[in-house]
Amino acid sequence: MIHIEKYAAIDIGSNAIRLLIATIIEKEGFPTQVKKTSLVRVPIRLGADVFLNGRISVNNYRRMVDAMNAYSLLMKTHGVSSYRACATSAMREAENGEELARQIRKATGVNIQIINGQEEATIIASTNLWNQIDPDKTYLYVDVGGGSTEFTVFSDRHNIVSKSFKLGTVRILNDMVSDKVWDDVKKWIKKNTGKYEKISLIGSGGNINSIYKSSGRKIGKPLSYLYLYNFYQKLKSMNYHERIFNLQMNPDRADVILPASRIYLSAMKWSNAKNVYVPKIGLSDGIIKTLYNERQARNIEVNS
């Protein structure tokens, strides 16, 4: 007999809001299978509101309500047994973030948890990352978002240190990242990776996924620093509309992909990493994993 259950994760970021529905398949004596059943992404750029005006606009609040209602119906249709909705940089910095979360819960029934940068990094680190990379090597995990970037150093299967910085693609687009922030990130990376002889990057986020897809690399093969540098120069040589038309990018990707590439390249340079692996794992995957772990813990308590 097998046990099948569906979980859902809602990731409310600074650039987009995502719904991931995953199917968990269990059979005694075998590893648990986690299959991504559905992924929906809505480009509601909350960061453009918050980082410029300090609060989420009425228009974007209404769009969020529509999105949560839609996601709620999708979860119901799929038969989702458990979900978690996590909001990151934009909502935690919005002066009306907590109030809007309460209003959205009242209007849609969806309970939004506003998490801090450390919680975000911890959730991301809980994913089944080691199934896709060599667990005995050292990596700098870089998760680039619209409002912040989370950095984590992994070595010999252990999470060594994590840090979240207000270095995000939407912030950079709006010229809201000071030289000091870049310098702080540089110092942190050098300090925490300098003792390792060999280190590689793990890239997370929609932008690096898009770059990886366009590269045509086989799954599991990394992108080199040279490839990413040349791709970045190609992006810089085009304007916004050329990236949409010539590279067939979505409009909400064609602008943020440039600052995202700069962040990844900078992290590779400062850590002396030659390659970046792209396992396509992020906050949504971490939420699914934590929901599953919590269910397992409850089962142990019941049966003990």
Image (cartoon, grey):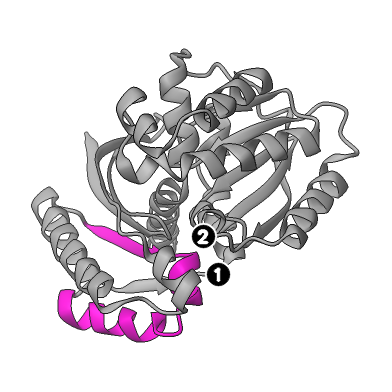
- Can you tell which of label 2 and label 1 is closer to the viewer? 2
Q: Considering depth in this image, is 133 or 235 the residue closer to the camera?
A: 235
Q: Which stretch appears magenta?
A: 81-108
Q: Which mark identifies residue 279?
A: none
Residue on which the image places disc 2: 174
Give the farthest residue toward the right.
195
Give the residue type that dot 1 points to.
Asn
Residue 296 on image: x %, y %: 41, 54
Q: Considering depth in this image, is 65 or 302 the residue closer to the camera?
A: 65
Residue 215 on image: x %, y %: 47, 17
Q: Residue at x 39, y 84 (%)?
A: 96
11 left or right of 218 in image: left
Quarter of the image where the N terminus is located: top left
106 left or right of 275 in image: left
Above or below for 3 versus 170: above
Residue 281 in view, yes or no: no
Please check the rendered image and state whether residue 104 is part of the magenta-colored stretch, yes or no.
yes
Crowd band around label 2 with a 10 angstrom C-alpha radius: few (<14), some (14–19), many (20+): few
Residue on which the image places disc 1: 116
Q: Quadrant of residue 153?
A: top right
Is there CB contact under 8 Å for labels 2 and 1?
no
Residue 35 in view, yes or no: yes
Q: Quadrant of residue 155?
A: top right
Crowd band around label 1 with a 10 angstrom C-alpha radius: few (<14), some (14–19), many (20+): some
Residue 37 on image: x %, y %: 23, 38
Q: Quadrant of residue 250?
A: top left
How far apart in space, not on screen, are marks 2 and 1 (Cα)?
A: 22 Å
Q: Tag 1's secondary structure?
A: loop
Magenta highlight: main SS: helix
